[in-house]
């Protein structure tokens, strides 16, 4: 009986010994939808981008075909170049309390991370702005030798990609998955809420009701996260 109690205590300690906080991007750290706003900045109507995306997800067209359609639309713009795009992403603001939350977490010794289906260049700009330690994405823009946009990476199954990124982050930082808190609001975040059992649901106009049902805690403002973690 003494051995059983000791084992249960160790498991409880492991679960509650939080060492990292992982944020998702659109809706959580920022109001900017990197894909749609990127298209808009290059003169592509959001409805046209959304149609291509829905057709790809629904299996009406292949991923390669959808990528080619988007590239063809983007490259008609004179702004489809690395300098303009990097400046665009750097100009996007995070939510007003995001920097406060990240600074608080880092002052307490927590590792901070972004895991996102958004573009690497966009997530990197936000990570740099907020001083977030790590970022992982499954999408990236590529340019030719003249700095002109000529290709991009994307995966349809964002939920699986995010789970792979979580495992990679934990491996690289010698962490257990359940030593991480994840903060998100969308359907693509479900796999991480399930894996960590420590999902903080952020109430937004894009929030997923299914994700809400899996949440450990819920907040309406990012700043509330500090009160929750202070109690862990």
Image (cartoon, grey):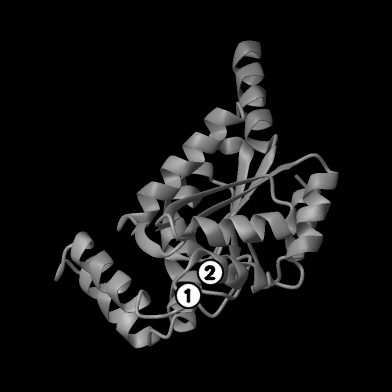
Q: Position of residue 106 (x, y in %)?
A: 79, 46
Dot 1: few (<14), some (14–19), or many (≥20) neighbours within 10 Å? many
Compare residues 44 and 18 and report the one nearer the observer.
44
- Residue at far front of view: 146
Q: Is residue 24 visible?
A: no
CA distance separating discs 1 and 2: 8 Å
Q: Going 68% across and 45% down the picture, which residue do you hit?
A: 133
Quick check: marks 1 and 2 in contact, CB under 8 Å? yes
190 over 61 or under it: above or below: above
Q: Is residue 196 visible?
A: yes
Q: Quadrant of the C terminus?
A: top right
Among numbered discs 1 and 2, the one appearing first in the sequence: 1
Compare residues 107 and 6 and report the one nearer the observer.
107
Q: Going 57% across and 37% down the picture, which residue do you hit?
A: 178
Compare residues 119 and 101 and report the one nearer the observer.
119
Q: Position of residue 97 (x, y in %)?
A: 77, 68
Dot 2: few (<14), some (14–19), or many (≥20) neighbours within 10 Å? some
Q: Quadrant of residue 163?
A: top left
Q: How many marks?
A: 2
Left or right: 135 in relation to 131: left
The residue that disc 1 covers is 38
Left or right: 80 in relation to 50: right
185 over 21 or under it: above or below: below
Left or right: 98 in relation to 114: right
Q: Position of residue 147 (x, y in %)?
A: 47, 61
Q: Going 66% across and 17% down the picture, which residue do you hit?
A: 6
The residue that disc 2 covers is 85
């Amino acid at each position: 009986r003494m051995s059983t109690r000791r084992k249960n205590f160790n498991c409880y300690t492991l679960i509650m010994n939080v060492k990292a906080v992982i944020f998702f991007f659109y809706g959580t750290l920022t109001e900017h939808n990197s894909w749609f706003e990127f298209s808009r900045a290059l003169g592509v109507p959001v409805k046209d981008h959304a149609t291509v995306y829905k057709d790809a997800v629904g299996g009406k067209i292949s991923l390669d075909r959808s990528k080619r359609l988007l590239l063809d639309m983007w490259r008609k713009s004179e702004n489809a170049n690395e300098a303009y795009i990097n400046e665009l992403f750097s100009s996007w603001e995070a939510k007003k309390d995001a920097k406060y939350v990240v600074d608080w977490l880092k002052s307490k010794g927590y590792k901070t991370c972004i895991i996102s289906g958004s573009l690497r260049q966009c997530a990197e700009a936000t990570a740099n702005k907020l001083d977030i330690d790590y970022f992982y994405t499954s999408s990236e823009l590529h340019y030719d030798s003249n700095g002109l946009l000529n290709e991009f990476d994307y995966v349809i199954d964002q939920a699986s990609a995010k789970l792979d990124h979580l495992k990679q982050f934990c491996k690289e930082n010698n962490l257990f998955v359940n030593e991480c808190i994840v903060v998100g609001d969308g359907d693509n975040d479900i796999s991480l809420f399930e894996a960590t059992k420590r999902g903080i649901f952020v109430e937004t106009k894009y929030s997923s009701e299914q994700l809400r049902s899996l949440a450990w805690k819920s907040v309406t403002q990012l700043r509330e996260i500090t009160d929750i973690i202070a109690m862990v």
